[in-house]
Each structure stands twice: as structure tokens, then as C-alpha cells.
Image (tube, helix red, strand yellow):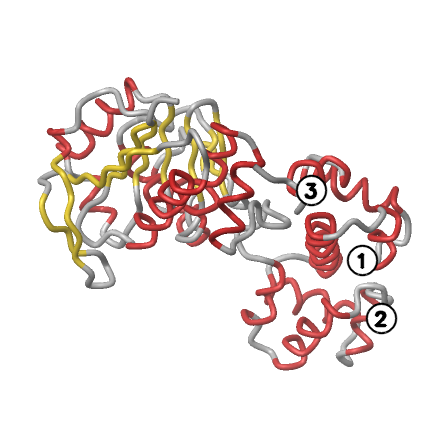
Amino acid sequence: MAALDVAVVTFPSAQILDVTGPLEVFSSASHLLPSVEYRTHVVSTAGGPVTASSGLSFSTTALAQVVEPVDTLVVAGGRDMVQACADDDLLAHVRRLAGSARRVTSVCSGAFVLAAAGLLDGRRATTHWAECRLLATAHPEVSVDGDAIYVRDGDVWTSAGVTAGIDLALALIADDHGARAAAAVARHLVVYLRRSGGQAQFSTLLAAQAADREPLRELLAWLPDHLTADLSVPALARRVHLSERQFSRVFTAEVHVPPSEHVERLRLEAACRLLETTGHAVDHIARVCGFQAPETMNRAFRRRLDTTPGDHRRHFGDDVGV
């Protein structure tokens, strides 16, 4: 199989993991998988050393030296996006390379560069959760999905914050070579092939760290280990000694979703992990994750993940191999 050229576009004050995350995924695929080769190139407007937001400097090739076509164009994000989006040379080269690339992608706030270049007009896209509103306001012609790890709209892929570049690169490998190949790379890197509950940029389990109020933090830490308990609003309100109305208000303000939605996300994440890593029957997984019946879990999978438990296991189960 011919090597696939991947150009990763960066600039001063870029987020280093936006660059190195995808690079490591593509590099690992080339070393691990037979008949798979990605040639990666890190490029910037002027070429030469670029200093990332972390202070780490790395070398790049000038965009003008990149010969078309590249197979995959990846635009990294960073701290000084206003400056990057005002770089006419950068935008011109991104448009040039995008015109002949098989697919165009961005990591984190790199979506702003694609939007500034006019490459997201009329498309769905995502970016770092903290920047979604700004992207939607600055570029109303873009349909911004603020609740996604990555979004594919035709041949344009965008991804959420920082580590989502790894999720994106794995998805690109799966698109090229199948889920088994991507799973082998994910296992080597000790990362999820696809994050359970991948519609959310934050793992639901991290919500406990984000809550400010101590009773709520304790409750959020308790929930994942008690998924078969009564997790209704009345029961949870009693546990933290609040009225149902006050509990719902405080919970939604702190966690940014209603209690019932948070509980369902937790149960879905737990079910996804068990489907991916065990051979337990679907009805058993439904019970131990608190769904009570397989039909209830199936409806939750369809509503939130647009799939079924069986399909999720077939695509992302641990038994996949190269």
C-alpha cells in the first residue's frame, strides 16, 4: 500500500499535544501494522523552529515547500488563535492544500483556522468546549456541535480539546484500515479506541472534580459505584439533605446537565466499558449498570449514541485484532 502523506499545520503558541498526539498515533500505526504507512510532516507558515504554548520548540517545514496533494491535512490549535487566523499566508496555504487533500481535519481550536479559511461554511463542526460559543458567534455559517469528541462532515473532520486529537487520529486510521487496525494502535498507546459516551467532551466521571459544593462532590464520587441503587431525583435529594427542587437546581448549575441525564450518562459509560472489555451478556450488563432491562439500555444507546449495545461491542470490543 502506498504511503499516505499527513501534513500537520502549526504556528507559534500552538498546543503541543495537538501536534504530537496525532503524530504519535500515525507513527504507531506505521510501526505496528503491516502494509500501513503514514508519512507525517509538521509545517508552519515560515518553517524553522516553532515554540509551542508550553515553551517547547520544535522544527517545521515551510508551508510553501509542501507539494500537493497531501492525503490528510491536520490543523492544530493553540493559544493565539486571533493571530493565527489573521495570518493571510497561513490561510492561503491551508486553502491550497485543502483543495486537493482527501480529507481536511482540525484539532481543538484549529477549527478557527478552518473556519477563517472558509472551509467550514455550511458544515457541522466542533472545537474545545470553552470555545464552541465563540466559534458559533464568530462564524454563524458553521453549525457548531458543542457536545462531541469529533465531528465528521463529509471529508472534513473537526475535534474537541487537546487529547481529542488522539481520538480523531484513531478514527482516521479506522476509516483507512478498519476498526481492528485502529484498536491495535489504541491498545499499544493504552488509550480507548473510542471514549465511552463519546458524545461528551468531558467524561461524565470527571464531573465530580468540577463541582464546587462539597455535598455534591461527595455524591458525584459515590454515584459510579452505585449504579444499581435508586438514583431518582427524590432519592438523591434525600442523600444530600436538600429539597428536590433545590437539589435539581444546584445539580444542574454545577454539573451543567440535569441529574437524570447525568445518571444515564454514567450508566452508558459503564455499559460501554463492559461491552468493550468483557464477554458478559447484554442483559447482564444492563442490570449491573442500573438499566433494569435490556430494552431500557437499548433505548438509551439509540437516543444518546445513535447505535445499539450489540453494534457498539462489534465495533469496539476487545476481541478485535489485526
Task: Answer above or below: position of 117 versus 260.
Answer: above
Task: Answer above or below: position of 205 versus 131.
Answer: below
Looking at the image, which residue is at 49% across and 51% down?
188
Closer-to-camera residue (146/313): 313
Residue furthest top in the image:
100
Looking at the image, which residue is at 64% across and 40% down?
320
Closer-to-camera residue (260/151): 151
Q: Is residue 48 left or right of residue 248?
A: left
Circle 1: element type? loop
CB under 8 Å between discs 1 and 3: no
Question: Foreground mark, 1 or 3?
Answer: 1
- State which tag comes first along the sequence, 1 or 2: 2
Question: Foreground mark, 1 or 2?
Answer: 1
Looking at the image, which residue is at 11% across and 29% down?
64
- State which tag comes first along the sequence, 3 or 2: 2
Q: Which residue is mark 3?
A: 304
Q: Is residue 5 left or right of residue 319?
A: left
Q: Which residue is mark 2?
A: 235
Circle 2: element type? helix
Label 2 sits on what residue type?
Ala
Label 3 sits on what residue type?
Arg
Closer-to-camera residue (136/217): 217
